[in-house]
Image (cartoon, coloured by chain):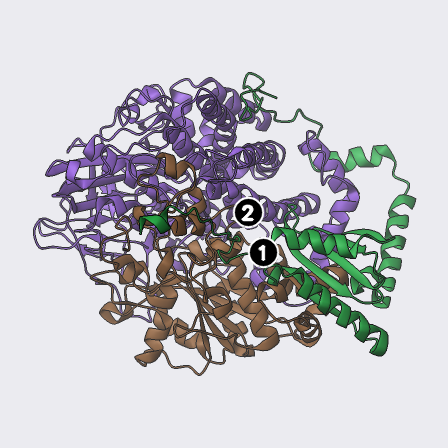
Chain colours: A purple, B green, C brown
Amino acid sequence: MSTVVVDPITRIEGHLRIEAETNDNGIITRATSAGTMVRGIEIIMKDRDPRDAWAFTQRICGVCTSSHAITAVRAVEDALQYPIPENARIIRNLINGAQFVHDHVVHFYHLHALDWVDIVSALNADPAVTAEAQGCISPGRTENVSATYFADVQLRLRNFVESGQLGIFTNGYWGHPEYKLPPEINLLAFAHYLEALAWQRRVARLHAVFGGKNPHPNFVVGGCPCAISSNEGDTRIDGAGLDLVAEVIQDMQAFVDQVYVPDTLAIARFYKDWFTKGEGVGNFLTFGDFPLTSPGSPDSLIDSDNLFIPRGVILNRDLSVVHPLDLNDPEQIHELVSNSWYDYSTGKDTPLHPYDGESTPNYTGPQPPYANLDTNQPYSWVKSPRWRGKAVEVGPLAHVLMLYATGHEATRDLVDGVLMELKLPLDALYSTMGRTAARAVETKLIADEMLGWYNQLQDNIAAGDLRTHNNELFDPSTWPAQARGAGFLEAPRGALGHWVVIENGRIANYQAVVPTTWNAGPRTTDANGKEITGPYEAALIGHSLQNADQPLEILRTIHSFDPCMGCAVHLVDPDGKELIQVKVI
Amino acid sequence: MSGLKSIPVEVETSPQGAPAVSIAPSILSQITAMLEALISSGQANSIDLQREPLGPQDHTKLRDTLGRGELAAELICLGPTQIRETAVSGVWWITHYSEDGRVVGEFIEVTTCPEMLITPAAELASGLSLLRSRLSMDAQVRDPGDIVKSLEALGLTPRHSFQADPKINQQVKRGNGNAE
Amino acid sequence: MPNKETFVEHLTRQGISRRSFIKFCALTASSLALPTGAARVIAETLATTPRPSVIWLSSQECTGCSETVLRSFEPTLESLILSEISLDYHNTLMAPSGAAAEDARRQAIAAGGHVLVVDGSITLTQQGTWSIIAGEATLDIIQESADGAALIIAIGNCAAFGGLPRAHPNPSDAHGVDSIIASGDLVTNAPVINVPGCPPIPEVMTGVIVHFLTFGVPELDALNRPTVFYGQTVHDTCARLPHFEAGNFAQSFDDEGARQGFCLLDLGCKGPVTFNACSSTHWNGATSYPMHSGHGCLGCSEPDFWDRPGGFYTPLF
């Protein structure tokens, strides 16, 4: 038995360490997922103006740069029962939709792809065969498909490799026996890696139009800050600005349909064995998102039927039952710190609902420099969220399964089509490659919705409704002395919730439970003494490592979750004198 | 006090907030001096128009005075670039665009030939190998059956492409309410 | 480690023409507000300068500063990755993980003369144990990586001034790079350039790197920020300045004034006290900037902007 340590896990957001115990056959029997950095933004939220909360929480993460901000304004709007105009609902959906599409494409090409694609092998590709393969993989594509194009990319790559200074590709695991793609597919994928770098900066402009900049576009409680321009040029939301938004949406759809989805399927075909491992826990949770109408919002978020991604919980892979979920029910969502570097005054093993949470960060791990964690002691800055005591997975697979289970036609068609093409059963989704395919599927689903939302916005404007912000409750003097509310959202990585308590116009308590916390949190023990393992740690069990110095297999599965450790945030306000923490990894 | 306030006053401001002053004459003087230097000593020079506080009328004045010459070239390198000789021999107007079509640089060069128009000798050799490599690719007689076999080795057969759901309305609505 | 190629050698290998190189030098000189003739100096210097090795270390980061560099339109990130610099260590982008990644970093340090980029603040609480990578405190990793560095760039408000983690009451004892040098927690002779913003505009970052390679450290203000980008307030160059001067102020985010692009001072804009290039260079390929999309400036390139009394919506005056 030995322990493989992988730290830093690269090509994620934030700081993650994986320790995997392997048996004599090199198979992982137990895994430990540890968040190794905390910003401890204790008390920072406390006593501040709730209208500022979106800007503070937004900086939890510069990748999912709109997710926390939208959740924060929703939390305050829920607390104050503060409705937003219809146009603001649509603009927030467009911003979140663009976030999904941008984030998933960048994740696939720039964070995940190097686990499946051997770029050095691309040097052996025949550009003419590559062009033919491109035509089979994506017949709808007409630009950048010629043999000359691929030959030019290959020449660039060859010259780069021969220079000796390989930059970010230095010490990559090139030539690892687990790389299974033929050279032509490697070359094709590398060409698209480069194209995606250009594409992503173009499509970020949607955020810049509505939010002024990306990363970290601006938001406001009560709607959106981007007033619609009276005359062309007065503000950014004029004819030219809206034309640019339409152009971005079409650019997104084209790249997703012609490049991202076909590439995912092309690569998946050569890694069918990765549809049989990396499952996780078989339980899935969504808070739901993308409200479709505004029946006097914030009520637009209450009814799960009004959400494009519905809310609910799926247990034990059973898609015939969607369990209802209530963010305010004290019996449902809890966080534990049994194996985390925090203290609870109520006892370390107490499960606490976010409204009642409390923590004090307290590092009790080994003093650096260290070679190994003691996994029998608390070992992470990430907490362990549970739904009715169970560990659940959040993220694209949860989204797609929830849509599938609730009978969403486009989802069923897409998923069934993908499975048929790959000649796989539905169960194949519960895996590393299944999760990766789900990410591509949901990107297409959302990209396909965005033009409809955009056209609704144009219809409203044409009909004379230009409202983007409701000012009625913006002044704190209009607020009740006490208010509390929960805001939620689906981020690209999964279910995100913020809970706020407002007293006399200031934040008294602010807490968040974040997607990667659900997925990456440490194991816990339930009331019956049974060990409950979280998704990351469960997914790695059974993986066999060909070469412990090049743990490609671990990276493939961990990356399939798209870790955002900065988001493993927990802002908890202990009652009384204790501290609120943003435990950000 | 109210008497003064009743006088309507409008301050003309440029986009930077400073009052408008015409700078074209000063730039034209610089160009004249640069052309004299080019003639006498062969020294080339340039003016970065983006660093000058040009008002909208200055641009027009410069264009009108310098006029348009015989030669216009369009380059594609890191995005488009336009190079035009003005009617004044030796004075060139260069406009750089980004890949997405924004103006990112504007220069006036006083020279016999802007460097960007010349093919550097060092690149001739790589041009030759590019031509040879493309000719050899053409020369490879590819049996269509070979291509099919290579594709089969990759496990690929032509397949339908993923299109957007045809039920989804693909028309983009414009600000005037008309779908296109 | 093989001899480093010069820029021009590398560009030629990449099939990037001399024309593109000339254009790049001209545009860079312009963006740095350098006098005419500087473009030629840039071209000649880069022709003989080896591509610098860049090590990017993230401490208490949100990754927004890496994301902003990814959005760079001029020069592009592909060109940065493949051409201008050798990005030898960057946790978010690099292929290897674990020991192989740390080896790549050590190789780059051993060669010396590298540029060290730091994003995120640095925590000193509980002997630095709140931020550990590969079993080492991040502070120690930064020290190791600063040895032999030719330049340190602190990108973003967190690395420059402590940023969000440092906001009151600063529970993780978070510091910017200048602060830990001043306290002696980090020992280095390398010059430090601060490129603050939350995050900064990417063209500022790339302009700073090129300026350093050709002319050395650019002129800096009292906060070690390059004056070419931080020498004016965003108010000075804001397109809404005429409205400010005319007394036209929006009173809410969607009133008639807001829709006509009135000045956002009464809605809390901190433009008059914020030094940055947002309203001259603009964001995302000149698509927009905060005020043009209707929200006031947060002041994110200034120290302690998170703690400004009154918060983001109280007017400055």
Q: Mark 2 points at which residue?
A: A201
Q: Where is residue B126 in the image (x, y as percent from the top left)?
A: 84, 61
Q: Camera-side residue: A302 or C214?
A: C214
The residue singled out by tag 1 in the image is: C77
| Residue at the image position 65 percent from the left and 55 percent from the top | B58
In the image, taking residue C179 as reference, residue C237 lies left or right, namely right
Chain hosting mark 1: C
Q: In this orientation, which residue lies closer to the viewer: A579 or C300?
A: C300
Q: Is mark 2 on a helix, strand or loop?
A: helix
Task: State the residue at coordinates (15%, 55%).
Answer: A579
Residue shown at 48% from the left, 70% from the top: C226
| Quarter location, residue C171 | bottom left
Q: Of the residues shown, which amino acid type is indicated by label 2? A: Arg
Instruction: Check contact, mark 2 vs mark 1: CB within 8 A.
Output: yes
Residue A79 locus on image (x, y percent): 19, 34
Q: Residues within 10 Å of mark 2 (few under 14, many from 20)?
A: many
